[in-house]
Image (cartoon, rainbow, N blue to C red):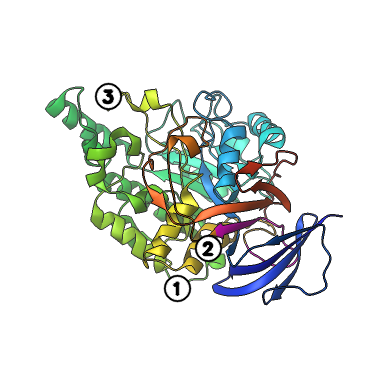
Amino acid sequence: MSTTLITNARIVNEGKQFSGSLLIRDDRIDRIWPGESAPGLVSDRVIDAKGNYLLPGVIDDQVHFREPGLTHKGDIYHESRAAVAGGVTSYMDMPNTRPQTTTQSLLEEKFSLAATNSLANYSFYMGATNDNLEELFKINPAEVCGVKIFMGSSTGNMLVNNPHTLKEIFSRLKMLIAVHCEDEPTIVANTRKAREKFGEDVPVYWHPVIRNSAACFKSSQMAVELAEQCGTRLHILHLSTAAEISLLKSGIPLSEKRITAEVCVQHLLFDERDYHTRGNLIKWNPAIKSSDDKDALLKALIDDKIDIIATDHAPHTLEEKQNTYFKAPSGGPLVQHSLAAMLEFYKQGAMSIEKIVDKMCHAPATAFRINSRGFIREGYFADLVLVDPDSRWTVSADNILYKCKWSPLTGLSFSHLVTHTFVNGHLAYDLGKFDNGTNGRRLDFKL
């Protein structure tokens, strides 16, 4: 058995903040004490937190680590290290790789890749198509985070637009369904108008005009109506509009909600004015929209209408992003910087640190029913992050860890710095240094 004692920490957990010490024994949190020290306790390793914050590890429920098939953009090894350096100890990866993760065998191949290459804990979504229903119904809900449905533009055959297929999935699948909601006919019509106006040289600031609020609302409304009819556990990914918030409910404990939603960091940080300075680097689907949308999303998050903060981490090469509008892919890397970015909202007085921990750590664990993670509790896995709140740093080429080597946040400065990250009790990241000796683990889920 190995033990690590963390002393003199400012523990943030379950809506409270207190000074305390914590003992890790092997992969679990063994004991938690209030106060600055644990007198007389002998441990293999002692870390004096020096009054820094001790948080549960962040759980990011939406990433694209690009493996297999797109590893020139990113891969499990590099992206999981970047995640751990940013305080993310668990992630859930999307199925639009090459090949797409639409069969049981391909899903298990991704789990095998992560078992040998991921420094963080992991799960992978199975992707739905119009013709893979039988594969979906073979999933063991205790071993897989969910099924992903693209109810909007996608690649290959992953756009699910067959009403019969959607009804079958929503009514018969006994696990969480995560949806990308943008109405395809609306986007096609808007794209045609943009081409008529600009030809092939559409300016990127037209992205939220093409992929507009109406497209998002129409698709999200259909998903919510289907879920309410069928009693589905629905999770709406990356909300980007004020209008969609009207589809959500508050005042219900998260553990009892059947319909949950998330917002991504980029939709809280940026608005349409930023296209003029950051261009395709902030081109995401759904599009970053108006300042009114941005403000409404933050308020809905604080009011508990929106449940989770994620990233939709989706790296591309800088060369790809520097293409013209139609050729530049959507998405960007964020998983290394999500916690630091959100803690700036705390620094600015816009959001409490307790609420940030709730939305990035507790809520994903609760909504996805993850076993023994997401909280600082005795007996839970020791997925933990130490954060220095007074160590200002700037995102730059020399500290970006993504395989693609760029960030849409380059030039932004943050006041909070992750100093240590524990994954299952293993000190995976320590003041800029990694220990790759122990990989993360496959997440498991309560039925």
Please say if 50 is above or below 202: below
Dot label at residue 309: none
- Alpha carbons under labels 1 and 2: distance apart: 19 Å
Q: Nearer the viewer, mark 1 or mark 2?
A: 2
Q: Taking the image as drawn, is residue 305 in sight?
A: no
What residue would you read off at disc 3?
324
What residue would you read off at disc 2?
357
In this rendered view, identify the residue nearer to me: 1 or 108. 1
Give the magenta-colored segment's residue range: 375-387
Disc 1, SS: loop
Disc 2, SS: helix
- Alpha carbons under labels 3 and 2: distance apart: 38 Å
Q: What kind of secondary structure does the magenta stretch mostly adopt?
A: loop
Task: Identify the mark nearer the N-term, 1 or 2.
Answer: 1
Q: Taking the image as drawn, is residue 381 in sight?
A: yes
Q: Is residue 381 magenta?
A: yes
What residue would you read off at disc 1?
251
- Residue 99 relative to residue 1: left or right: left
Task: Identify the mark nearer the N-term, 3 or 2.
Answer: 3
- Tell me residue 329's x, y (percent): 37, 29
Q: Quadrant of the C terminus?
A: bottom right
